[in-house]
Amino acid sequence: MGPHVHMNLTRQWALEEGFGEREAELVAVANLAFDSRYPARASFANITKHFAPTAWAWSARYLSIAVRGGDLMMLGYALHCAQDGVAHGRLGEKHLLTLAGLGRHPDFWDRAPRSVQRRIEAVTRHRLRRFVRDVR
Ligand SMILES: [Zn+2]
């Protein structure tokens, strides 16, 4: 997904889930920075962080570290992997379809079906709530 989801919507949902302004900003900035910290093009290990099904395992791992240490950056990483896991489809088939000239580009929020938007919001809020519940 692009910056609208990783940054703007993530910050908005974090605020709505009870995070403070500063906390919500840190989570959103970490989420957005994940693509430049672990660019999918750089290595196979990085690819696994942005595509289902492996992105779900990374999200769980980052969330567990986030909860253990009250770490907002790790929470941002956990959200990124989950959002990409929904958006990119299984094994990144959405990206492959786009490369083949078929289907929509998976990284634009406006072009995503409402069902995909709803799932991205749901997996994000689920992780934000888990953090709020277990850390504070
Ligand atoms: Zn990504």
Image (cartoon, rainbow, N blue to C red):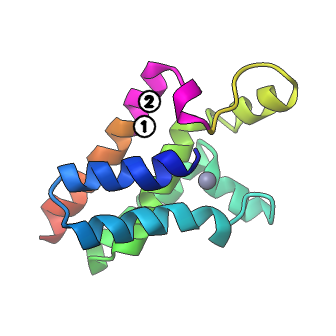
Vertical side of 75 occupied by 59: above or below: above
Q: Is residue 106 left or right of residue 33?
A: right
The answer as to whether callout 1 falls within 8 Å of ligand 1 is no
| Secondary structure that dominates the magenta span | helix
Q: 35 or 47: nearer the eye?
A: 35
The answer as to whether callout 2 falls within 8 Å of ligand 1 is no
For badge 1, the amino acid type reads Ile
For numbered disc 2, what is the local secondary structure?
helix
For numbered disc 1, what is the local secondary structure?
helix
Q: Which portion, as a residue range, is magenta?
A: 108-120
Residue at image coords 80%, 64%: 43
Are discs 2 and 1 less than 8 Å apart at CB? yes
Q: Position of residue 135 (x, y in %)?
A: 17, 70
Q: Is residue 82 visible?
A: no
For marks 2 and 1, give the CA distance.
5 Å
For badge 2, the amino acid type reads Gln
